[in-house]
Image (spheres, rainbow, N blue to C red):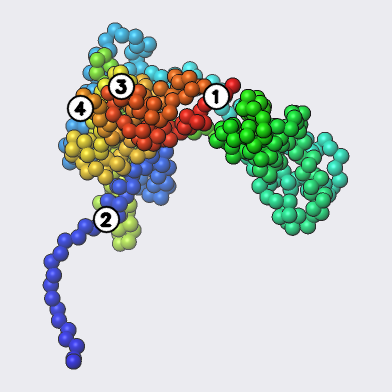
């Protein structure tokens, strides 16, 4: 059979994601710090993109978005909101009216920030930054090396000691076997054993142990707490100790539960992580994307524009793109970069506007939370906000991811306000987060010697007309990282 070649037409629909659309989606889900990094990269890569002084940012946005009437309305609404807020405050406790005026004019799309987060005055510019002059604490390795230097070790033992200390992790445990260390530097195994024994006698007690059992044994030995029962519990019953199954330990050791409890109290005073005091954790800072503040009887939303670069397209490159100075490939390159810069400015503006709209909707729906607290948090899903702001649910999900809101009740991720509904006896519903908060309060107030079981918590919630099954209580408790009642019980 001969091959038959034909030409035919077919009409079909498909969704094409342009590079600009992909980048817009990426911008929407970036956190504030990631956005600042991305903008800095774009400033380096695109010569037509420049950073504006804050006073000219409004002009740059208007020039890039002149056709977007909704954007202009949004900006006007923000500025009107700022002026209304100042009027509503009236003669209430405002420390400096000049700060309000400065706040309403310095940023084109950000109302004044709460006084607690406002930048310091000019008189504080010369004050020293105490974060830069705080002395850094020693690491665990530095602490151990310092002690080894005071011992009379041979060169070979010094080498072995440094090798062992270099393989002690931040918890204080030796994370490599001596056989592996021996092969690494071709050292004598007996000598390594002796050096490790010396290191295990250093400060902090328990350092250099290879597991939890050895860590506790070292501390018992150094504290002269060896009395037989303590050692037997550590050697043979750590699993039962973890589960607080004291009856099994008492039966195995043929002693009373009271005697087991007394010796367990000794063990609880030991430190299972001897290196924790030397752990240097870098502070984790959360920069809010929006501020929610109450002015008079109204709640106001304002974007946090502090530290965000103000962008505009270079006038020089604009003229080159439209004029006759540049020709050929040079002109095409400039046109492409100018277009990219204009699009980036527009995309960032749309991102900020979307965050504002979504936050405003959240505040409106969760007004009782802001007024009265967590127990008044209402059930809310992505679809609710999506319908209010006329956006897709996936867009709301991206907007609320890694975005934070500064409120008088603390800093919350926007996703915090989305909760499933839990039924109540009167036919109403409440947010699952409010139920979690109630469970945490009940456990905090319980008798430590008679902690509440999950079923008892469920029964107590039922008396409060909150219908939650025992399994749901267990799930919420695990989410809150709270131990079950058997492990919360205090015997002493």
Give the structural element (helix, strand or loop) at label 2. loop
In this rendering, would 59 be left or right of 145? left
Relative to residue 152, is residue 459 depicted above or below? above
**Residue 155 in the image: x percent, y percent?**
84, 47
Mark 2 or mark 3, earlier in chain: 2
Residue bearing mark 1: 490
Relative to residue 272, is residue 154 depicted above or below? below
The residue drawn where x is 38% and y is 26% is 457
Residue closest to the eye, 318 or 105: 105
Mark 2 or mark 1, earlier in chain: 2
Q: Residue 427 carries which label?
A: 4
The residue drawn where x is 26% and y is 43% is 395
- How far is the residue under mark 4 from the one under mark 1? 39 Å
Residue bearing mark 3: 463
Mark 2 or mark 4, earlier in chain: 2
Residue bearing mark 2: 18
Give the structural element (helix, strand or loop) at label 1. loop
Q: What is the quadrant of residue 423 in the picture?
A: top left
Instruction: Characterize the local packing of mark 1: few (<14), some (14-19) or many (20 or more) Cα atoms within 10 angstroms.
Output: some
**Residue 195 in the image: x percent, y percent?**
80, 44
Relative to residue 453, is residue 51 depicted above or below? below
Q: Quadrant of the N terminus?
A: bottom left
- How far is the residue under mark 3 from the one under mark 1? 27 Å
Which callout, 4 or 1, points to the residue nearer the camera?
A: 1
Mark 3 or mark 1, earlier in chain: 3
Q: What is the quadrant of residue 269 in the picture?
A: top right
Q: What is the quadrant of residue 146 in the picture?
A: top right
The residue drawn where x is 28% and y is 35% is 420
Q: Quadrant of the C terminus?
A: top right
Which callout, 4 or 3, points to the residue nearer the camera?
A: 3
Instruction: Characterize the local packing of mark 4: few (<14), some (14-19) or many (20 or more) Cα atoms within 10 angstroms.
Output: few
């Amino acid at each position: 059979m001969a091959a038959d070649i034909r030409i035919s037409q077919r009409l079909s629909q498909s969704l094409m994601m342009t590079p600009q659309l992909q980048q817009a989606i990426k911008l929407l889900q970036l956190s504030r710090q990631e956005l600042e990094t991305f903008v800095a990269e774009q400033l380096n890569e695109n010569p037509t993109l420049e950073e504006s002084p804050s006073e000219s940012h409004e002009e740059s946005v208007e020039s890039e978005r002149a056709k977007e009437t909704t954007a202009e309305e949004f900006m006007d609404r923000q500025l009107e909101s700022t002026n209304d807020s100042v009027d509503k405050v009236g003669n209430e406790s405002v420390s400096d009216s000049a700060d309000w005026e400065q706040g309403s004019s310095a940023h084109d799309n950000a109302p004044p920030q709460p006084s607690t987060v406002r930048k310091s005055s000019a008189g504080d510019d010369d004050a020293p930054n105490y974060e830069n002059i705080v002395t850094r604490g020693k690491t665990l390795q530095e602490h151990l090396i310092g002690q080894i230097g005071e011992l009379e070790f041979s060169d070979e033992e010094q080498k072995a000691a440094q090798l062992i200390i270099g393989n002690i992790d931040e918890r204080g445990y030796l994370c490599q076997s001596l056989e592996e260390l021996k092969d690494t530097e071709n050292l004598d195994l007996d000598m390594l054993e002796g050096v490790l024994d010396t290191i295990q006698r250093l400060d902090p007690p328990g350092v250099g142990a290879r597991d939890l059992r050895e860590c506790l044994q070292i501390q018992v030995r150094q504290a002269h707490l060896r009395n037989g029962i303590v050692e037997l519990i550590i050697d043979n019953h750590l699993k039962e100790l973890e589960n607080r199954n004291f009856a099994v330990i008492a039966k195995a050791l043929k002693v009373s539960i009271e005697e087991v409890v007394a010796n367990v109290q000794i063990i609880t005073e030991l430190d299972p992580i001897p290196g924790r005091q030397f752990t240097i954790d870098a502070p984790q800072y959360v920069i809010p994307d929006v501020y929610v503040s109450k002015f008079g009887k109204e709640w106001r939303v304002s974007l946090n524009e502090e530290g965000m670069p103000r962008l505009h397209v270079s006038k020089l490159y604009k003229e080159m793109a439209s004029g006759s100075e540049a020709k050929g490939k040079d002109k095409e390159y400039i046109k492409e970069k100018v277009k990219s810069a204009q699009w980036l400015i527009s995309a960032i503006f749309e991102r900020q506007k979307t965050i504002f709209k979504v936050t405003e909707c959240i505040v409106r729906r969760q007004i009782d939370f802001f007024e009265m607290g967590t127990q008044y948090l209402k059930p809310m899903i992505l679809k609710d906000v999506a319908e209010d702001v006329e956006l897709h649910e996936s867009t709301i999900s991206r907007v609320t991811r890694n975005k934070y809101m500064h409120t008088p009740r603390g800093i919350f991720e926007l996703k915090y306000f989305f909760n499933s509904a839990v039924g109540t006896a009167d036919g109403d519903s409440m947010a699952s987060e409010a139920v979690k908060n109630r469970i945490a309060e009940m456990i905090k107030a319980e008798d430590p010697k008679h902690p509440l079981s999950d079923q008892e918590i469920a029964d107590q919630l039922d008396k409060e007309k909150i219908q939650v099954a025992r399994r749901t209580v267990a799930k919420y408790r695990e989410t809150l990282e709270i131990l079950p009642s058997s492990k919360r019980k205090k015997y002493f």
